[in-house]
Structures are given as structure tokens and as C-alpha cells.
Image: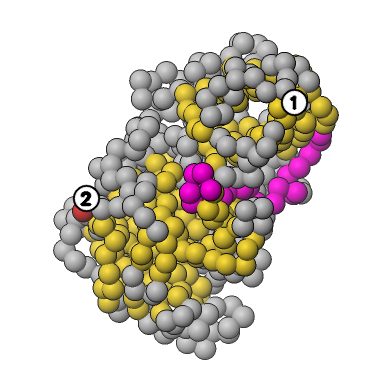
Amino acid sequence: MVPGYNQTRRPQVHFSPAVNFMNDPNGLFYYNGTYHMYYQYNPTGITAGNQHWGHATSDDLYHWHNQPIALSPESPDEGIFSGSAVVDVDNTSGFFGNQSSSNPGIVAIYTLNTPSKETQNIAYSTDGGYTFTKYSGNPVIDINSNQFRDPKVIWHADTKKWVMAVALPTQFSVVFYTSSDLKNWKKASTFSHHGWLGNQFECPNLVEVPVHNSQQQNSGETKWVLVVSVNPGAPQGGSFTQFFPGEFDGTDFTPEDDAARWVDFGKDNYAMQFFYGTENKTLGLGWASNWQYTNIVPTSPWRSAMTLPRQYALWNDPVLSWQFISNPTDMSTIMNKNLFSGKVTKSKNIKLGDGSGAYYFDIYVSQDQGQATQRANFTFISSSTKEELRMGLLMDNGPSFFIDRSGTKGFDYPLFTDKFATIQYGGIGGWHVYGVLDKMILETFLNEGEQSATTTYFSNGVLDKFSISLDTGLSATVNVTALKSGWDQKK
């Protein structure tokens, strides 16, 4: 076990820093078998501020290795705000001279925040992303604004140019820039006043994703998605992330419509970013917290964690329109002991407690006899404190799926909203519910990832029992598996 990762509320399969405060994921990229994750980090305290880029690496997205801080401000009044990183295989930037194509350079693109303005800057790495040199010609974009941040850069193959999406937060806009060398940028277009506005736009991400057909299989087609985070002013309070399916021609993004679509119906998934360099897979993760309460949640000596790493696709649901399908990436390296597999017809109590304290659950509910008032309840319980973390299906409304964290008593704050629900349209006679419970985070996925919810919770006791209760006419096929800790470096 990595030292410092055994606290009662410490997540075991979600990344968290050893100490101090973390927020947005930054600079996600994959190259030569290694995933790199940078993140907004305060190395001197457990509240937001003093922004640096922390750094961690992994070969499976679950076993992480903490690395030294990658980018630091030059003075106390500066902050290294959110941004992205790319693999400059063809040395378009000119930073890497005769460096071998088998060991290409990495360029980080970030916002430098100062008391007077926010500008876009770059830094380059000749050692694979572990150390960086800031470009002497910074800033690469300066529009003399104090609300201009969070650049996400991709390579657009059709136009053979780099494309940057960057936020003008208080103008509810995302601006697109293009470049051939990552140093000189030209404004291409603006995407403005679409979807849910809230109080400001942040952390835009543009990505091309596979489209699934009606059988939830890859159709061979792709579509562009623009992801925009909103804070404050989310529908459930604080911060959230929305997505826009559409088309991108290298300069202009054209959405399918102006609908506001949520990435996650919980309250704790913000500033999601996609990995650069994962080829045919669209992989990403988000920050598992909310700005309404992140600075005061009861964890120490760290605050915040990332969501599970997820793989994404689009599906045009005939009822709900475009859905952003998300599922956990391959978890085979952390699967441990199976605790229960079988059919439940009325009720079942499953003892937890083996392994790291993180668990995977998979439930398929069948409606053998239909009644409008039927319910299926799934409850994690602490045998010592009787606290409960509840979720379930309500057949009398949609059906709908709910999550209720009000039964955990370790954190009481007016803005820590305790109940969430969504309409969940299942297949004929069945509903699929699966996910991960991990010390202080519950991630739930519905119907092959058509909808998902990330929910933090803070119990005083350990949740060591999983209770399933089904009304007459319902049955469920259930699998519960203990997970290995990602901080145990023995796979």
C-alpha cells in the first residue's frame, strides 16, 4: 500500500492526492503505454488556491503513481490554471529539434491567471511530460481579459491544424482558435449562449466520439461533442457539466440543437476532460466534487478525488434524444473477491467488508408481473451506526431511478443536496443498474451507461452491508465483487 492512503474515507479506486487540495483534471494524455494526468493543485493547503499542476501516471487508470509537481507559478500572485497537453509527434512547435519520433515532445497549454488578466501560455517537455520548460514567447494568446481560460487543444486531422477551445466564462462563450505550430493562433469562430447558461462557462472540451446504433453497438460512424462546464448556477446548484452533440469542420462547431443535456445527473462531476492520444477510444474523467461545498467536506489531509475513468460514446435514444454513453474503463486489474452472485426474488443482505472497502455491483431487475407502484431498493448500510446510502427504482414514475445520501451523517451543510433522480427508460421488462461504491464516492450507471450519477457521501461508520429489497413481481440478477485498492501496487 502506498503510504498515506489508508484513511477511513480515502477512496481506493478513485485518484486523490496524498495531501492538500485538488480540483480540475488537466493535460490528460496517453503515450507509449502510460496515461498522464495533471490536475489543479494547491500544494500548501486543503482549500482551493495557489494553483499549480499536480501530476500522476498510470498504466491502467486505476493504479496511480504520484509524480512531482509539473508546472508552478513564478510569483505568489500568479496561478497555473486549467489547460491541456498534446503529443507533438511531428515537432510542429519546433521545440524538439532532432528528438526521436519514438520519444516525441509534449506541449502543455494552460491559462496563466494574474490579478489583471488571464492569458494562454505553453510549456514543453523533452522527457515525456515529467518536467516542463515555459516558452519564452508566452503568452501565445492575450486578449486583455480577466475572464479567458481553460484551453483544450486537439489535432484536427482533416485540416492538419491544431484547434483550441477556450472559454470566455462571463460571455457564456467558447472561442475556437487554430494553429500550425502551437505558438501562433488565429481566431476561427465563437460558440455562444447555447444550452444551460448558469453564471459562467468553463473547461470546454471538443472530441470526436463513436456513435452507437439502436442495439447499443458501435455503428462505425462518429460525431463531434462539445462539453462545457457551468459554475455557479447548475440546475441542482453549484457546478455541473453539459454536452452538445454536433459537427465540427475545423473552424466552426454546429450543434444538433440548443438543448441542455447533462453529462451526469448527480452533483459531483465537474470539469471533465478527455485524454489526448487514445486513438479509437474516447476516454476521460472529471473532478468528483462541487464548488458549493468542496472546501469544507470532512476529509484530511487531502480534499477531492477524480471520477472513475470512463469510456464515452453517443446514442440517439428514440425517446430521450442524444445521450452521452459513459462506462467505467476496463476494471480487470482491480477485480478481487466475488461476494455474491445469484438471483434475488424478494430480499437479500450481502455482507461487505472484504478487501479495500471499494465494491463493484451489477444488478439487472426484471419485471415478472407489472404493477404501477412497484419499487426496487438497493441500500448500503453501516452496521455500527445504522447509516444508509440508498438508491432504487420507482416504477410509478417513468420508471425513475433515485439516489438518496441523506442517511449518511458525516457532513451536514444546507447546499449538500441529498436526493437525485432521473427518468430511466429500460428495455422491455428489464433495467440494468451497476457501479462502484468507494469509501466516499458512489458512481452509478444505468442501462449500459445511457445515464450516470456521481455522488459523494460522508458516513461516520463504514458501509459494510448491501441490502436489496424487491416488491412482489420483481426479481433481480445480482453480482457484488470486492475491488483491490489502486494504491496497492501489486496487481
Is residue 108 visible in the rendered image? The answer is no
The numbered dot on residue 368 is 1
* Disc 2 residue crowd, few under 14, some 14–19, many 20+, Cα 10 Å: some
Query: Which residue is depicted at the point 71% across and 27% down?
Result: 367
Residue toward you, 311 or 408:
311
On the image, the x and y values in percent for residue 99 come to 54, 84
Query: Which residue is depicted at the point 69% across and 33% down?
Result: 429
Q: Would you say 34 lies left or right of 106 here?
A: right
- Answer whether residue 319 is magenta in the image: yes
Residue toward you, 367 or 486:
367
- Of labels 1 and 2, the one closer to you: 1
Is 383 above or below relative to 65?
above
Mark 1 or mark 2: which comes first in sequence?
2
Instruction: Label 2, secondary structure: give it.
Output: helix
Query: CA–CA distance between discs 1 and 2?
Result: 52 Å
Q: Give the image quarter of residue 230.
A: top left
On the image, the x and y values in percent for residue 449 come to 60, 45
Q: Would you say 313 lies left or right of 162 here?
A: right
* Boundaries of the magenta span: 318-338
Q: Are marks 1 and 2 in contact (CB under 8 Å)?
A: no
On the image, the x and y values in percent for residue 419 come to 47, 24
Residue toward you, 459 or 123:
459
Residue type at tag 1:
Asp
Instruction: Label 1, secondary structure: give it.
Output: loop
Q: Which residue is mark 2?
A: 170
Is 437 above or below relative to 18?
above
